[in-house]
Image (cartoon, rainbow, N blue to C red):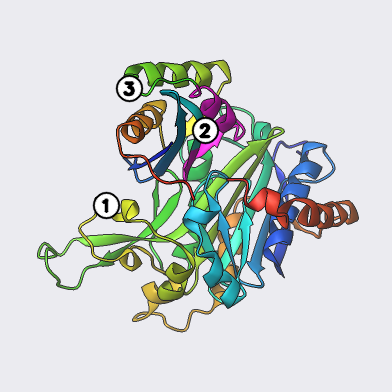
Amino acid sequence: MNTTGALQWRVIPLETHNAFMNMALDEACCDAIARGASLPTIRFYRWQPSAVSIGYFQSLEDEIAVDACRAAGVDIVRRRTGGGAVYHDYEGEITYSVMVPERDFCGSGGATGDSSCGGAARPLGITESYHVICGWIIDGLRTIGIEAEFKPINDIVVPVARVGGAGGADGAAMMKKISGNAQTRRNGVILQHGTILYTVDVRKMFSLLKVGKEKIADKLIASVEERVTSVRDVLRDVRPEVTREALYEALLGGFTRGKSVMFGAWSDDELNSARRLAAERYESEGWNKMR
Amino acid sequence: MRYIATTKVAGGKLLRVKADVDGGAVTRAELTGDFFLHPEDGVDALERVLIGVDVGAAVEAIEERLHDAAMRDGLTLVGFEVRDVAQTLYIALHSDSVTSS
């Protein structure tokens, strides 16, 4: 923190790595922040090869169609964060990570751009911090014409009008998920990461994930595919020209508005540490098949 | 014998309990799902405390074990509660066993 109390952030601009390196960079960055060697950091990234990530508590075999992933050349990695299974399509989504000391990530009630501590602002708890960071995504989406809402605990949804259909006589909008997020707090550092869907091949997604009937048990809809949407789907009829680059710029704006930021790069220590973590943890069967 | 039950917690998170039973009591338990738990390694404590649960145990007794472990280890459950774990284990123990593969 600088002398005026405003939190100084480092932003790592959009980059692409494989699944193992992406997770390893998150961990290496958190470690560097914990020992004071790095600033609080916001990063944006894509996954190449495309990959599925599973939450820390998920059973890999229960959640992932492993043979389908192998056939499609899709990597599989377990995250350090809880939450569900996510398909990270190289062409279809942008992922972010926010990494910041718990004691420095504050608010005074309501989601605002200023997350610095002092005065009435105090360190945010888990549910509050989801709300604040998801608020940055919502701000970004608004600038490209999407009105999204935060759905606790960790989702961002967009109302999509129902078009006729049985049971849809009241014309109520269906809320479809456009972003999922997950958070862990270790060594006094918050890591929250999440995806924002630019375009989604729902059939491909659900060919790689095993979706149990329990997940849709209490819904009156026939297909899990109907619960997910993307920037391209939402803007199809009104702004079909919005590119993935435009989405990235919009997210960058939403994440950095009201903040003191410097655009930076990984330190040599972070990169070396990440390469080691990717090889020793995230690529290992012992880690990925832990549950 | 292995018993499995899966429940969908109010709010949308999925919780699965797999329990191995021998001699009328749980010998091993595994909790999986898309929930959040802080700190994450607290799941080990919750699983450990289910060892020894009698197959005829009441939900409240199971819940008390889990509650005590969560309190002792300062665990924060997000998207589920210890009651959900207790109820899911209870359902598992009262369902047909599955063949382990």
Residue A278: image quadrant is bottom right
Q: What chain is tagged by disc 3?
A: B
The residue segment tinted magenta is B31-51
Q: Visible in this render: residue A250?
A: no
Q: Which chain is home to disc 2?
A: A
Other-residue count near label 3 (Cα within 10 Å), few / some / many at <14 / 14–19 / ≥20: some
Describe the element under mark 1 as helix, strand or loop: loop
Instruction: Work out how far the residue at label 2 is from the one at label 3, CA to CA, in angstroms.
Output: 40 Å
Could you tell me the amino acid type at mark 2? Ser
Quadrant where the C terminus of chain A sits is top right
Q: Which residue is mark 1?
A: A217
Q: Which residue is mark 2?
A: A108
According to the picture, the residue beneath numbered tag 3 turns out to be: B59
Quadrant of the rendering where the N terminus of chain A is positioned: top right
Tags 1 and 2 touching, CB below 8 Å: no
**At 81% from the left edge and 60% from the top edge, which residue is drawn?**
A265
Report helix, strand or loop for mark 3: helix
Near-viewer residue (A145 or A208): A208
- Nearer mark to the viewer, of 1 and 3: 3
